[in-house]
Image: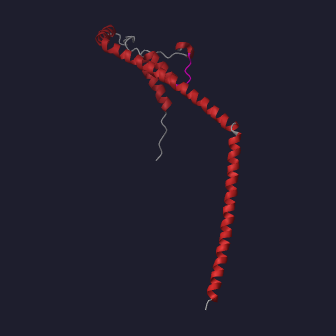
Amino acid sequence: MQYEEIPTQQIIDKLRQTLEPRIGIAELSLSERPNSAIAQNEDDEDIALLKAGFDIYNIPITSYQRRLGSAVIAVRKIVRKLLKPVLDRQVIYNFANTRVVQTLSTQLQKLQENQQTLEKKLTSEFSSGFPEVTAQLESQQQAIANFQSEVEQIKAVQQQHTAILQEIAAQLLDRQP
């Protein structure tokens, strides 16, 4: 059974297109983005979207109905006034979450940069440094190899001695009456 790949980026783009008009965020061109920062990756784009859309109270109230448009707008304004305490709390919560996400994102970027720096430093130190350790390791490996060959030679001599002793024991047994 084969599974088809889920087009994650297309889903995210579609969600942004449908949600941005609802929460009053116009798609900004790269030069119009806040702080004139161009989002370098998807996380930065999501954070920019959070920053632009955390205030759900101050969304423009519009109606697309010609006949009942003014009545619909009036009703929406009344509902907004009734929901003001709840919406204010939600706006504060959204703002706090946006700040937390921004802070965590910044810390993550710093940690990733530090990790890359440390990896480069370790790689350069281990590739070019510690020649005395490398020399000691090589000499110990050579000593181990020499020791192993001596052990093999001793085993071979021991087998020869065992064979000779067995022959002698056999000859002695043959001579006994």
**Residue at screen point 55% across, 21% down:** 39
Residue shown at the point (49%, 29%) measured from the top left: 10
Q: Is residue 13 positioned above or below 162 on the image?
A: above
Decide whether the magenta segment is chiefly helix, strand or loop.
loop
Residue nearer the viewer, 44 or 144: 144
Residue 167: image location, x then y, percent? 65, 80
Where is residue 84, by image quadrant? top left
**Location of residue 151 in the rendering, given as x and y in whole percent from the top left corner:** 66, 62
Identify the residue at horizontal 42%, vertical 21% (top origin): 19
Residue 49, percent from left and from top: 47, 19
130 vs 139: above or below: above
The quadrant in which the C terminus is found is bottom right
Tell me if 84 is positioned left or right of 176 in this view. Answer: left
Magenta stretch bounds: 37-42
Residue 44 vs 3, above or below: the answer is above
The answer to whether residue 111 shows anywhere in this view is yes
Residue 23 location, quadrant: top left
